[in-house]
């Protein structure tokens, strides 16, 4: 187990704080990624000779943190509420601030009404300077040595964009890990958009009545609603009377009680239940692979291999080496495109994923995954495949292409997560991939904790927010997460990755093919590297350099794309698949080279 030196005590303290903080409070996982992306190189040294003697040993801390993570996962219901659970339990706008005046969470109403985002300083909130100073003063009291609770207190603020008054109630609150936060709650609230469709359907409201009901529930009177909707006051009042009649309420007070009750019922997202992956809505086409596409195969050593087969009944085969987050999920339109192009999609779940058995004791992961895939091809009578990889799948695709080049007709590479070059290339990766690469190459003993913490974080915040964390603010990828059909495919694939807890994630990262750059250089087959235009600065420079000079490789940049091309630019992905599967055949919607 690598150790952490006593070079800079602040670095060590911060490193250990995130270790234990995430173990007790999994929703702080993003803080761990942020801290470790900067501190990992400082905290980890080689465990050899004098360096090991001088180092502060992390092994015992990691073991304790892993035990706490196990407690978090197994006794989730008995633990104190997380920040997210605490804030989203409020109907009104609510946000949390730490003693340094940094926002540490906000519910939907606060985010919508005040444009509050995590990690913003108080100074960016749309309130007058005096109110912000008063909030900062109360927040600073959280750090007082006496540890006295803050509040209850009332702060009157004025919104800087409208000059309207806002009343904020303040109370201190202590998280599971002992961190003290200031909870600010206002009388304002915002109608959750996700509640509109079921409420409209339940009460048979027209589109206009639903829009008026939303504004009415948010505290607007008939004249204000009329101005916002550019309608007459008489029209709005008639719509309000119709809403009262359809909802069986008889006054504004009665209606508001009903509206507040509905909003409290609609606050928890369907995918936020602990340990449950989101299920697709009945209103959209179910994603692929579906139940009828899943199969089981017994391997020579008695283990089982879970795999999916969908698309065309006959034609070239695409062997899909899935990633570590979205698994083998495909949107229905993308799968239908594969069928129309006469492409069969074969997606084996690697050991530790889906219903596939774990890796045998002492095996090398990428070698065993290659052997399992080749056995599957032989049993299905498939001679050659187009090999496609996404993120963590690249490690296994490169291994198979290197071991059995005669079985691979072409290789499509998308967003591999590990750098083919040195430390300089690693520093250019996005935060999570930088942390992951550092752990894999220099501190593999931390990998078990990080993958367990990631699973606990998912269980606390739900699938959609989990994915949003790793999207790191990328607008195109976040838009895909907000699309129900696309998100359903992501969630379906995530079920495969998380079916055995953290084991699938851990197994995917545990061992890395050595000399990946050399393997890539020596591959002798048609290769396409597909990269989103916006992702290019964060993709491994070593990969791009090899792609540009490889005689059989085409580097294709997808305009407007980012990391999640599989979901955001599926036509560009399918065009590349068809090009490799059927050389010389024209495919529509080609991405710009």
Image (tube, helix red, strand yellow):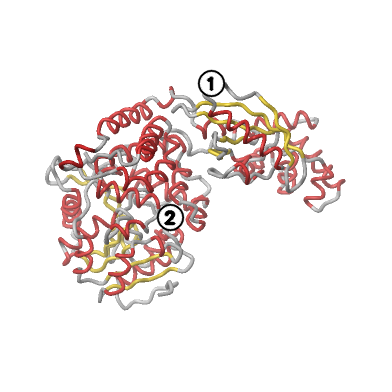
Q: Which quadrant holds the N terminus?
A: top left
Residue 441: x and y in percent read 25, 50
Residue 522: x and y in percent read 19, 69
Looking at the image, do the residues carrying marks 1 and 2 touch, with CB atoms under 8 Å apart? no
Label 2: element kind: loop
Q: Which residue is mark 2?
A: 331
Please give left or right for residue 494 compared with residue 113 in the image. Answer: left
Residue 119: x and y in percent read 53, 43
Label 1: element kind: loop
Give the camera-side residue of 29 and 188: 29
Q: Residue shown at 81%/45% (left/top)?
A: 224
Image quadrant assignment for residue 25: top left
Please give left or right for residue 336 compared with residue 55 in the image. Answer: right
Q: Residue shown at 38%/24% (left/top)?
A: 75
Q: Residue shown at 30%/51% (left/top)?
A: 437
Please give left or right for residue 105 compared with residue 500 in the image. Answer: right
Please give left or right for residue 385 compared with residue 283 in the image. Answer: left
| Image position of 521 with respect to 2: above or below | below
Q: Which residue is mark 1?
A: 146
Give the camera-side residue of 315 and 55: 55
Q: Which mark's residue is nearer the viewer, 1 or 2?
A: 1
Residue 514: x and y in percent read 19, 56
Q: Which quadrant holds the C terminus?
A: bottom left
């Amino acid at each position: 187990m690598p150790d952490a030196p006593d070079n800079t005590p602040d670095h060590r303290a911060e490193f250990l704080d995130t270790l234990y903080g995430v173990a007790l409070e999994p929703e702080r996982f993003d803080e761990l990624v942020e801290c470790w992306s900067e501190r990992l190189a400082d905290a980890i040294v080689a465990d050899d000779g004098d360096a090991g003697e001088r180092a502060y040993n992390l092994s015992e801390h990691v073991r304790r943190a892993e035990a706490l993570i196990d407690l978090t996962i197994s006794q989730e219901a008995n633990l104190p509420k997380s920040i997210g659970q605490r804030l989203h339990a409020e109907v009104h706008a609510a946000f949390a601030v730490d003693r340094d005046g940094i926002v540490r969470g906000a519910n939907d109403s606060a985010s919508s009404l005040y444009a509050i985002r995590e990690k913003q300083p108080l100074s960016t909130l749309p309130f007058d300077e005096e109110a912000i100073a008063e909030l900062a003063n109360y927040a600073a009291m959280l750090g007082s040595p006496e540890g006295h609770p803050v509040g209850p207190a009332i702060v009157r603020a004025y919104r800087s964009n409208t000059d309207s008054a806002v009343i904020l109630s303040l109370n201190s609150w202590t998280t599971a890990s002992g961190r003290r936060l200031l909870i600010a709650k206002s009388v304002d609230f915002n109608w959750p958009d996700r509640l509109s469709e079921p409420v409209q359907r339940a009460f048979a409201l027209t589109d206009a009545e639903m829009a008026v009901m939303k504004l009415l529930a948010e505290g607007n009177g008939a004249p204000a609603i009329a101005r916002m909707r550019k309608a007459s006051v008489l029209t709005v009042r008639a719509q309000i009377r119709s809403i009262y009649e359809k909802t069986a309420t008889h006054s504004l007070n009665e209606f508001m009680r009903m509206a507040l009750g509905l909003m409290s019922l609609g606050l928890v997202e369907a995918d936020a239940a602990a340990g449950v992956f989101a299920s697709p809505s009945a209103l959209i086409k179910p994603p692929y692979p579906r139940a009828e596409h899943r199969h089981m195969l017994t391997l020579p050593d008695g283990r089982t291999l879970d795999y999916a087969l969908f698309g065309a009944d006959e034609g070239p085969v695409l062997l899909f080496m899935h990633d570590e987050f979205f698994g083998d999920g495909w949107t229905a339109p993308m799968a239908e495109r594969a069928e129309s192009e006469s492409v069969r999609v074969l997606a084996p779940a690697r050991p530790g994923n889906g219903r596939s058995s774990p890796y045998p004791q002492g095996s090398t992961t990428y070698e065993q995954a290659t052997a399992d895939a080749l056995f599957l091809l032989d049993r299905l009578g498939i001679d050659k495949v187009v090999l496609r990889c996404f993120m963590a799948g690249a490690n296994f695709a490169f291994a198979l292409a290197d071991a059995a080049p005669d079985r691979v007709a072409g290789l499509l590479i998308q967003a591999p997560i590990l750098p083919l070059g040195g430390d300089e290339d690693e520093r250019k990766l996005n935060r999570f991939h930088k942390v992951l690469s550092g752990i894999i190459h220099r501190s593999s003993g931390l990998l078990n904790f990080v993958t367990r913490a990631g699973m606990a974080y998912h269980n606390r915040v739900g699938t959609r927010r989990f994915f949003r964390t790793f999207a790191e603010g990328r607008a195109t990828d976040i838009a895909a997460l907000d699309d129900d059909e696309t998100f359903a495919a992501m969630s379906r694939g995530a079920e495969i990755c998380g079916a055995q807890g953290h084991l699938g994630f851990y197994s995917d990262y545990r061992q890395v093919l050595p000399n990946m750059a050399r393997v890539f250089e020596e591959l002798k087959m048609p290769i396409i590297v597909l990269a989103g235009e916006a992702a290019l600065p964060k993709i491994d420079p070593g990969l791009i350099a090899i792609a540009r000079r490889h005689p059989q490789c085409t580097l294709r940049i997808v305009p407007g794309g980012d990391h999640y091309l599989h979901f955001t630019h599926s036509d560009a992905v399918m065009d590349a698949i068809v090009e490799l599967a059927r050389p010389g055949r024209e495919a529509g919607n080609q991405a710009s080279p």
